[in-house]
Amino acid sequence: MIPKIQKILYATDLSENAAYAAPYIIKIAEQNSAQVDVLHVLETPVFPSFAEEEKWEKFYAEQKEKARDKMYRRLTQFCQQQLKGNTNIMLTISSIEVVEGDPAAKILQRADELKADMVVMGTHGKGWLAQAFLGSEAQKVLQRIKIPVLIIPLPDKEKSAQPK
């Protein structure tokens, strides 16, 4: 018997094509009366060795705050655009978060904190060679997670951002 899905973590990079995964998430949430938590992770930058650490950290702190504000606004706007016309679906969104760190680690941590039943993420297909050498955040999550993960292949930028 398949366990009931009550809590879904949607990890998004907020790319133009990230909207492609939204209809899947909405449908799964509707069918299971599940709550959806939306997560975006800002990667922690590596400071150049020649930079004055104190000045660089101050600059980065300011930029990080601006980025968090911008990403939160984009996430909120993204959710509203995807859910227009069906206001009941907005009730399934229980949180929208922007955090900083290693994307795979933060996704795993948040899924654990939420006691999520499923993680949904999009991935950009870059071919087997790129995957073999570079890996992807989805691949890193899959290697370490203990709950189901739904990976939505996102179209190339040249293709439509919405599924047909």
Image: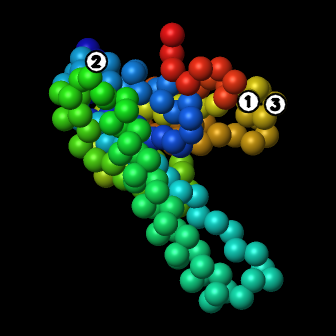
| Residue 93, image x, y percentages | 26, 38
Q: What amino acid is found at the position of numbered circle 2 in the picture?
A: Ile
Q: Looking at the image, which residue is at 57% across and 83% down?
A: 58
Q: What amino acid is found at the position of numbered circle 1 in the picture?
A: Lys
| Residue 68, image x, y percentages | 45, 61
Q: What amino acid is found at the position of numbered circle 3 in the picture?
A: Leu
Q: Looking at the image, which residue is at 51% across and 20% down?
A: 162
Q: Quick check: marks 3 and 2 in contact, CB under 8 Å?
A: no
Q: Is residue 111 visible?
A: no
Q: 152 or 135, which lies in front?
A: 152
Q: Is residue 1 visible?
A: yes
Q: Looking at the image, which residue is at 35% across and 45% down?
A: 76
Name the residue tied to disc 1: 126
| Residue 42, image x, y percentages | 53, 57
- Which element type, helix, strand or loop, lies under badge 3? helix
Closer to the observer: label 3 or label 2?
3
- Which element type, helix, strand or loop, lies under badge 1? loop
Kindly report the distance in space between the C-alpha atoms of the residues bearing marks 1 and 2: 32 Å
Kindly report the distance in space between the C-alpha atoms of the residues bearing marks 3 and 2: 35 Å
Closer to the observer: label 1 or label 2?
1
- Whether residue 92 sits left or right of residue 140 in the image: it is left
Name the residue tied to disc 3: 129
Name the residue tied to disc 2: 2
Q: 116 or 73, which lies in front?
A: 73
User: Which quadrant of the figure has residue 147?
Assistant: top left
Q: 16 or 144, which lies in front?
A: 16
Quadrant in which the N terminus is drawn: top left
Closer to the observer: label 1 or label 3?
1
User: Which quadrant of the figure has residue 140?
Assistant: top right
